[in-house]
């Protein structure tokens, strides 16, 4: 079992990472939130695979939770799904102490977190992430959101969970694309915070790509949670250092939007985005060519997803400039000067982004 603490001004919460713990999660939840009622918000896939195990353990602890199931996929991160959930919460007559359990991947974490943070001006939320991306990233740090047709994550809140509790063994049923997507975020932590961790992850990448033994991921996930907890603890509201976690996300978000959300997973697009960011870093002379090639070699140990082949550099730029993080026409990206050590958020030009895109589209991949 690994335990990581997220320390914030005025509050703190635990992240508990333990293989084969799903069937005893009820106990951990009861100990933290007491004898309460509430809801489990999950999606159909997670419910089919793991819903009964969670319901059983809650029941065994005498906790009364009603399960609300939404369709899997990004489309559920919407105001209309949120509205449906609000109505169900109102019908259940939940009160301020009722607890929302967000049981699923990042879509469920963001949606249930959003609903939980706004219903009755905020209920306690427990995150129980079930994808690699959610376990290493989205369940920690309190960002919640839904999408509008104009763009992703345009409506949201900061609402820290009461706790995050996860079982890496559930990752054994994930698709290979979803595993790769999570690994994209894993490698990101290494490059912005801990270069040794990056190389350790790269050296074992084949093992991680075939999650036959989820328990073997426990320490990898814990290290990511430690890094995220550290960064969020220093900058909860994303006004400073937390922005380095957007490494790879400027171009990544452009690719996700340009491929119509779906062709590539979030973390898969981020892998390409990181290659774009290190390319710009070496083009500016921040990274020596040798360092650039070494990191590129590391990142391409992952079997990369194909890029959307009809997306042009000009189109990519349009999607990038629509992103909510672009303010006043200024596009920022996260650039590396020393991997894991010196990382800065800097303005990048349209020409640099287009050149980076040309590099990405010309890259021979495995
Ligand atoms: N809040 C944050 O800080 C933050 C950070 C990164 C990403 N995100 C958001 O996270 C979302 C992506 O999350 P995701 O990649 O987890 O996608 P997801 O939630 O859509 O899950 C991917 C797929 O895996 C299925 N699934 C979940 N757990 C499973 C399991 N154990 N076994 C088999 N299948 C399982 C889901 O039903 C879904 O079909 C995006 O909306 C992104 O914006 C949020
Ligand atoms: Zn991300």
Image (cartoon, rainbow, N blue to C red):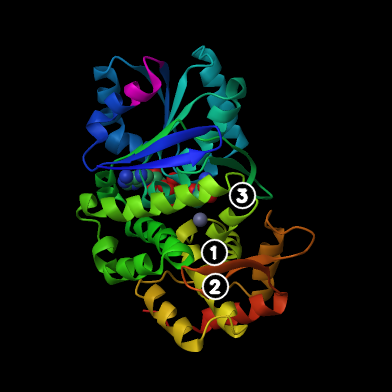
Q: CA distance from mark 3 to mark 2?
A: 19 Å
In the image, what residue occupies the spot 56% across and 60% down?
244
| Magenta residue span | 29-36
Nearer-N-terminus badge (3/1) = 3
Q: Residues within 10 Å of mark 3 (few under 14, many from 20)?
A: some
Q: Which mark is residue 238?
A: 3
User: Could one spot residue 265 in this view of the protein?
Assistant: no
The percent position of residue 326, horizontal first and vertical second, equals 71, 59
Q: CA distance from mark 1 to mark 2?
A: 9 Å
The answer to whether residue 183 is above or below residue 10 is below
In the image, what residue occupies the spot 24% across and 18% down?
60
Does 141 lie within the magenta span?
no
The answer to whether residue 265 is above or below residue 92 is below
Task: Name the main secondary structure of what is drawn in magenta.
Answer: helix
Q: Residues within 10 Å of mark 1 (few under 14, many from 20)?
A: many
Q: CA distance from mark 3 to mark 1?
A: 13 Å
Look at mark 2 in the image and give the residue it sits on.
336
Nearer-N-terminus badge (1/2) = 1
Quadrant of image for the C terminus: bottom left
Residue 286 falls in image quadrant? bottom right
Q: 290 left or right of 28?
A: right
Q: Nearer the viewer, residue 248 or 358?
A: 248
Look at mark 1 in the image and give the residue it sits on.
247
Q: 312 left or right of 330?
A: left
In the image, what residue occupies the spot 59% across and 85% down?
285
**Callout 2 secondary element:** strand
The answer to whether residue 179 is above or below residue 360 is above
User: Could one spot residue 235 in this view of the protein?
Assistant: yes
**Callout 3 secondary element:** loop
**Callout 1 secondary element:** loop
């Amino acid at each position: 079992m690994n335990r990581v603490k997220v320390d914030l001004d005025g509050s703190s919460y635990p992240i508990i990472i333990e293989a084969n713990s799903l069937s005893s999660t009820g106990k951990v939840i009861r100990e933290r939130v007491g004898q309460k009622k509430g809801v489990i918000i999950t999606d159909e896939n997670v419910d089919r695979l793991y819903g009964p195990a969670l319901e059983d353990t809650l029941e065994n602890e005498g906790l009364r939770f009603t399960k609300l199931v939404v369709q899997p996929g990004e489309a559920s991160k919407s105001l209309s799904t949120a509205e449906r959930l609000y109505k169900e919460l109102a019908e259940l007559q939940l009160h301020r102490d009722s607890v929302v359990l967000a049981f699923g991947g990042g879509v469920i974490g963001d949606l249930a977190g959003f609903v939980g943070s706004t219903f009755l001006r905020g209920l306690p939320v427990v995150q129980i992430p079930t994808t690699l991306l959610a376990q290493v990233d989205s369940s920690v740090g309190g960002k919640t959101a839904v999408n509008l047709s104009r763009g992703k994550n345009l409506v949201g809140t900061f609402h820290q969970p009461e706790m995050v509790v996860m079982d890496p063994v559930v990752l054994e049923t994930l698709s290979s694309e979803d595993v790769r997507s999570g690994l994209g975020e894993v490698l990101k932590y290494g490059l912005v915070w801990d270069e040794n961790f990056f190389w350790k992850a790269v050296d074992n990448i084949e093992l991680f790509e075939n999650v036959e033994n989820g328990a073997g991921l426990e320490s990898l996930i814990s290290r990511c949670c430690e890094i995220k907890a550290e960064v969020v603890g220093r900058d909860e509201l994303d006004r400073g250092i937390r922005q380095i976690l957007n490494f790879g996300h400027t171009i990544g978000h452009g690719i996700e939007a340009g491929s119509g959300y779906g062709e590539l997973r979030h973390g898969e697009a981020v892998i390409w985005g990181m290659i774009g960011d290190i390319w710009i870093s070496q083009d500016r002379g921040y990274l020596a060519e040798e360092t650039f090639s070494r990191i590129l070699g590391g990142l391409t140990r992952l079997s990369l997803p194909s890029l959307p082949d009809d997306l042009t550099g000009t189109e990519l730029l349009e999607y990038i400039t629509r992103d909510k993080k672009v303010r006043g026409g200024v596009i920022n990206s996260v650039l590396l000067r020393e991997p894991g050590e010196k990382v800065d958020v800097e303005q990048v030009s349209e020409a640099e982004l287009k050149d980076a895109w040309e590099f990405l589209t010309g890259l021979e991949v495995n």
